[in-house]
Amino acid sequence: MPQSLPNKPIFNYPNNKLYQYEAYPVLLSCNFVVDSTNGNGLGIRSLKGSGIANVFMHTSATPGEGNYSMLNPNPAPGVIEVVLNNNFNRYLGSMGAGFVSPVSGTPLTATTAHTAYVIVSLGTATLAQWQAVGFPVGMVPAVGAAFVATASATIGGSAAVETVTSSGIDSIEVIGDPNVTLQNSNLYQNCGGRILLQCLAGGSLTAPANGSVCGLNFYLSNSSVQVNGQ
């Protein structure tokens, strides 16, 4: 006879926990738009992320001041300098990094079936009009939302979408040993630690395409207690 299933679920998710040896682990996350021509002179725009003071990339404009009056050193195309708000004791690793594809820059008012699009203008299109070209039922159309078109048709209501291109980047790697640049001698004047990264395509330093959204995650320790293996 087949065995009956247990009355209780096999996995009790609310009680699952992550155990680790680090006494004071910290995860910092940020994202920003690569924008080398922006007049702010930072090489980026729209920086978001708690614990991150500045992100500097290559700029074709006059290098500008970021938060805390820090001047962009204007690194080579493809290099990213991340300035933290605080000092930390150790760099433990990166918890993933990557890019959101930039849009093509050419607004379209009609879709082609099976093509991925990003909404760039809602216009006055109704929910029914969006759903007719493939926007998922149960979701609300918004600028930035992506969907796969199920019909080749005009959206209507002057709404517009764009196809996507590519950031052109295969991977992001850390430059040097971040552990020796996590402690700033004058925290209040110069902000906290710094981490350098490089963007690579085919193993070569490469500038991400403008309009790409870059997301970075840093796993750090804020404890002076060293555990086994450190």
Image (cartoon, rainbow, N blue to C red):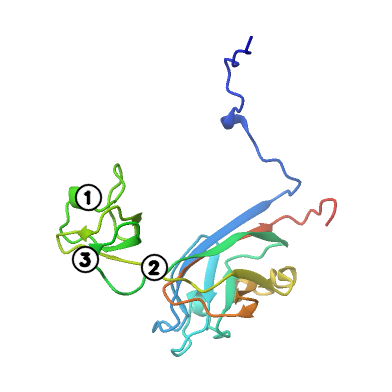
Q: Amino acid at mark 2?
A: Val
Whether tag 2 and tag 1 are in contact, CB under 8 A, the answer is no
Can residue 189 be seen?
A: no
Can residue 179 be seen?
A: yes
Camera-side residue of 112 and 81? 112
Which mark is first along the chain, 1 or 3? 3
Instruction: Please name the residue shown 58% across and 72% down the image.
Output: 82
Q: Position of residue 218 (x, y in %)?
A: 62, 61
Identity of the residue furthest to the right in this view: 228
Q: Position of residue 29 (x, y in %)?
A: 55, 59
Q: Amino acid at mark 3?
A: Thr
Q: Is 112 displayed left or right of 23 in the figure?
A: left
**Which residue in the protein does label 3 denote?**
109
Q: Quadrant of residue 187?
A: bottom right
Q: Quadrant of residue 36?
A: bottom left
Instruction: Please name the residue shown 46% across and 89% down the image.
Output: 60
Q: Amino acid at mark 1?
A: Ala
**Which residue in the protein does label 1 denote?**
132
- Up the image or down, 14 lies above or below 84; here it is above
**Which residue in the protein does label 2 denote?**
164
Camera-side residue of 31 and 151? 151
